[in-house]
Amino acid sequence: MDLRFSEEDEAFRREIAAWLADALTGEFACVKGRGGPGDEHALFEERLAWEKKLGSAGWTCVGWPEEHGGRGLSLSRQVIYHEEYARAGAPGRVGHIGETLLGPTLIAFGTEEQKKRFLPKIVSGEELWCQGYSEPNAGSDLANVQTKAELQGDRWSITGQKIWTSGAEWSQWCFALCRTEPDAPSHQAISYILVPMNQPGIEIRPIVQMTGTSEFSEVFYDDAGAAVDHVVGERGQGWKVAMGTLAFERVASTLGQQHMFQNELEAILQIARENGAAEDPVMRQRLADAWIGIRIMRMNALRMLSHAEDGTLGREAMITKLYWATWHRSLGKLAMDVLGPASEMAESAPYELTGLQRMYLFTRSDTIYAGTNQIQRNIIAERALGLPREPRPAPPPKS
Ligand SMILES: Cc1cc2nc3c(=O)[nH]c(=O)nc-3n(C[C@H](O)[C@H](O)[C@H](O)COP(=O)(O)OP(=O)(O)OC[C@H]3O[C@@H](n4cnc5c(N)ncnc54)[C@H](O)[C@@H]3O)c2cc1C
């Protein structure tokens, strides 16, 4: 297996690196390194302007086919793009949910009208999306969603509650899982509906997280409206579409993210050298382990790419979320241990945290969102290793 990038790939690397170095100056110098985990509210307007700048230069949605406004980049070039993006210290993307989740789902399952209506505004950064899946009683057990959508003339009327909706506050649209077929079994009862967020029937209540910010919200729907033709896939077949989105989420989140991790590890190493933590033999061991872990991630990513046929990742991709989430959560803990007592002090009143403190607090959630570690292990056991399926609880009797 050849793990090297081709000369053409390296030329592409130079092109994107040069563009980023030039673009992240002047009015955009301030967004460098901002908007990462736990820092999502930072310089939002500036990062929105950055999203539009990327879009107008053709640097959003780079893996999408050209006919849908992307660049049709191969997986290896997408990795290069993400590597250079992180290496340049470019900011957390405000449009990432539309680009990585909704867009690929529409390309795979949407109607021509839906693609024409929604994809261009994701590419240009004009419309931001959020994901309305989880509910108070439907997380890992997603098929239990209870939010209802009823067809009333030419509109869906949606009533119910979603929770943990990332970016709800700044999104114009949400792709929501709603129960549309009350008498059907769960997997044929749910539809995948595109809902405008700015309407009277929707109330967004931000949830304050340990970081002091609100990356996600509770969202209450009370006769909220959605257009009749804004169902993706067949009515009642939203489960299949939703699983498509989750597959994109689990794979897309891995591409090239190691460079962001590398930047964090380097910051930790720097502190360890300065404050003497690197002299401690146990700490040295843990720092070396973290360094090794990041190399393993890279080797595994390259191995996946070299096995990818027709742009489709093989089953070894299934270990990626479990591996990086566990590694990154440990890195957060390592950062605090390297900082020692300073890790417990806020930079200034009332609760101004450093980047590493925010990272530590946010990484507690890495092993939860986009499928918990336990759910990832079930996926690996059942789909990659072919072990017997976990017993599923019997559906509750109908009242
Ligand atoms: C930072 C963050 C952002 C998020 N953003 C969004 C978003 O934008 N949109 C959205 O819809 N959701 C979002 N979520 C929600 C996320 O998808 C859920 O938290 C996740 O699916 C787990 O569901 P739950 O919280 O209800 O936990 P539960 O499903 O109640 O799980 C509780 C515990 O039980 C374990 N467990 C559950 N079922 C099994 C099983 N079958 N086998 C073994 N163990 C099991 C779990 O692993 C976990 O440890 C976000 C979550 C976080 C933390």
Image (tube, grey):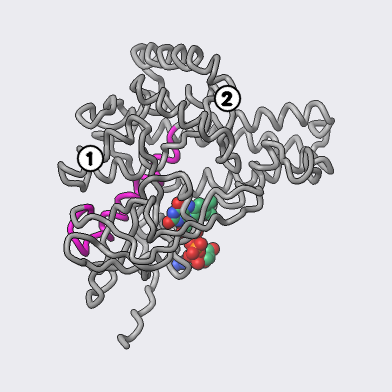
Is 239 included in the stretch rendered in magenta? yes
Position of residue 18 measured from the top left corner of the image (x, y, whole percent): 46, 11
What's the residue at 28%, 45% (across, down)? 105
Q: Is residue 22 above or below residue 148?
A: above
Q: Are marks 2 and 1 in contact (CB under 8 Å)?
A: no
> Are there few (<14), some (14-19), or many (20+) residues within 10 Å of tag 1?
few
What's the residue at 44%, 65% (across, down)? 135
Q: Ligand 1 near label 1 (Cβ, under 8 Å)?
A: no
Q: Is residue 122 above or below residue 361?
A: above
Q: Residue pushed farthest front?
A: 200
Q: Residue pushed farthest bottom?
A: 399
Viewport quadrant of the C terminus: bottom left
The residue stretch that appears in magenta = 230-255
Pair 2/1: label in front: 1
What's the residue at 36%, 38% (across, down)? 127
Q: Write down the quadrant of residue 151 in the picture.
A: bottom left
Q: Ligand 1 near label 2 (Cβ, under 8 Å)?
A: no
Which residue position is annotated with label 2?
32
Compare residues 182 and 306 and report the one nearer the observer.
182
Position of residue 7 measured from the top left corner of the image (x, y, whole percent): 36, 11
Q: Secondary structure at mark 1?
A: helix
Point out the tag, 2 or 1, that comes first from the N-terminus: 2
Q: Is residue 52 above or below residue 99?
A: above
What's the residue at 34%, 61% (across, down)? 224
Image disc number at residue 117: 1
Give the residue type that dot 2 points to. Answer: Lys
Is 197 included in the stretch rendered in magenta? no
Query: Alpha carbon of mark 2 to alpha carbon of mark 1: how far?
Result: 32 Å
Give the residue type that dot 1 points to. Answer: Arg
The answer to whether any part of residue 195 appears in the image is: yes
> Are there few (<14), some (14-19), or many (20+) residues within 10 Å of tag 2?
some
